[in-house]
Image (cartoon, grey):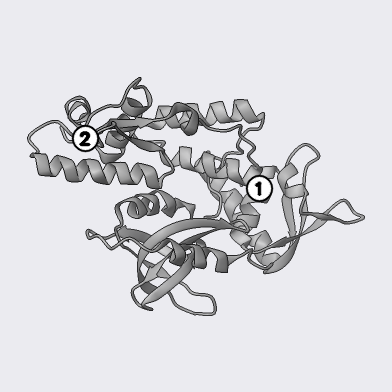
Amino acid sequence: MAIDRTERLLNLVICLLGAQRPVSRAALRASIPGYAGDAGDDAFERMFERDKDELRQMGIPVETVVNSQGEVEGYLIDEDTYAMPDLDLDASERAVLGLAARAWSEATLAAQASSALRKIEASTGARWAPILAGRPTAGEEHLPLLWEAIRSRAPVRFDYLARGRDAAEQRTVEPWATVHRGGAWYLVGHSRERQAGRAFRLSRVTGAMTRLREEFPAAGRDDVDRLVDELGDPSARGVARVTLPETGGAWLRRSVRPRADGSGDVDYADITVLVAEVIEAGGAILEPPDAVTLQLEALRAVCAIHGDDDA
């Protein structure tokens, strides 16, 4: 049975992390599923070098141990260097981890992802607020496909409604990274139509996204960092008047400017994100009208999902 690359990388980390002495290439080839088999020596060497480089790019310290004669004895992952520091996550970072765990909900590692999230919540003392079923989309449904496309360096194709345009246009993009800014998700990558690096807000993607069966060259780190830096913090697109319960929405309440009547004003960059956050906090949007309409549509969708026909 073919071994998934992610599973092979995980097995490699476990093998090197638990070793008391350097593990040779021969021992790794014999013990890790995916290396052993009918593959020739050259194929194994290429596979192992790619895996080792990918782990190092992820920040996993795979050490090459050389003896006094300059010969490679094997490989190790130093436990102290690899150990995770104390966690100090804010609400948005916990939300990203929760979203990642949800993306694994139907995968082989679903139980492990859920367990990891519970351990993080236990160590930080704060829980991730789950995304409400039926919430208006902010584009995060595309993230699992994009993460896999980024890992395998596969281009993606989608229809995109650019700001100020009346109709969506097809885009083919070599994805470099996904970024969360001001409550909105962005895809950063090389646009083949524009022949340049671009950032695409995922909430403006219309319809399905497709991963193409080809591979593109790796992007330069400077190009990726430059585009991410240019995103900055999106300026507010508008102001909404909201009400929040006394016992919920603490992360949102920090951004609300109170009014005398008990409601408050909050700036927003993406109206779909605002509606989702207010609903999940148990609050309500009072103004502007388009946000109120979107809020009602989202609540009707929730009622439909749970079989309530009286909404």
- Image position of 275 with respect to 230: above or below: above
Pinpoint residue 243: horizontal percent, then vertical percent.
78, 50
| Residue closer to the observer: 230 or 201 | 230
Q: Residue furthest top?
A: 20
The kind of residue on which mark 1 rests is Ile
Pinpoint residue 292: horizontal percent, then vertical percent.
68, 60
The kind of residue on which mark 2 rests is Ile
Report which residue position mark 1 lands on.
Answer: 279
The residue shown at (34%, 22%) is: 19
Residue 295 visible somewhere in the drawing? no
- What kind of element bears circle 1? helix
Specify whether 34 is left or right of 255. left
Specify whether 192 is left or right of 266. left
Report which residue position mark 2 lands on.
Answer: 3
Picture quarter containing residue 96? Answer: top right
Pinpoint residue 112: horizontal percent, then vertical percent.
42, 28
Upstream in sequence: badge 2 or badge 1 = 2
Pinpoint residue 257: horizontal percent, then vertical percent.
83, 56
The N terminus sits in image quarter = top left
- Image position of 230 with respect to 55: above or below: below
- What kind of element bears circle 2? loop
Picture quarter containing residue 310? Answer: top right
